[in-house]
Image: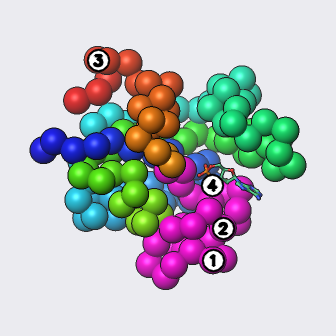
Amino acid sequence: MAGNITFTMIKPTAVKANHTGSILHMINEAGFEIRGMKLIKLCKEQAEEFYAVHKGKPFFEKLVNFMCSGPIVAAILEKENAVEDYRTLIGSTNPETAAEGTIRKLYATNMTENAVHGSDSDENANIEADFFFSKTERF
Ligand code: CMP
């Protein structure tokens, strides 16, 4: 299936709470195909680099510390209109305002520990996928 890609991370709290299987099930049910996937624990430098666009914001340090607090699942997802459709599936950043039935509404704890990350543009999806996956880890 030809389509666009998006990049996602299942964040530490959701992995620790054993929500990985349910979240991946929702991803597949929504028509996404998994093109790469790994369980990995970020170090502080990697989390700072990944979220560099947020450096200087009040939540940056808390976000970085959280993202290296335990393993995450990183994945490349493919589907037509992947970026926009995945953002619809996960719901808004703040789980309190996320739509019913979305991944964040179901599995997020709060704004920082919001269950999953999703790319915000095609350009960033490619940058983020390249950050985690080599050519031989993508299918
Ligand atoms: P994510 O989609 O991973 O992209 C950036 C992350 O920063 C976001 O999810 C949230 O976890 C976090 N974030 C964004 N805005 C805020 C905020 N106002 N307060 C706390 N965390 C935030």
Residue at position x 40%, y 57% in the image? 84
Residue 115 covered by magenta stretch: yes
Using the image as rendered, state which of residue 122 and residue 86 is in the foreground: 122
* Residue shown at the point (28%, 43%) measured from the top left: 4
Q: Position of residue 105 (x, y in %)?
A: 55, 74
Rounded to the nearest angstrom, the CA distance separating label 3 from label 2 is 35 Å
Q: Kindly state the secondary structure of the residue where label 1 is placed.
A: loop
* Residue under label 3: 136
Circle 4: element type: helix
Which circle marks residue 97 in the picture? 1
Per the image, the residue denoted by label 2 is 94
In x, y percent, where is residue 71? 58, 39
Q: Residue furthest bottom?
A: 100
Calculate the distance from the C-alpha at mark 1 to the C-alpha at mark 2: 6 Å
Q: Mark 1–mark 2 contact, CB under 8 Å?
A: yes
Left or right of residue 33, residue 44 in this image: right
Residue 18: x and y in percent read 50, 58
Image: 139 above or below 99: above
Residue numbers of the magenta segment: 91-118
In this figure, which residue is indicated by the disc labeled 4? Answer: 13
> Would residue 129 be visible to someone looking at this image?
no
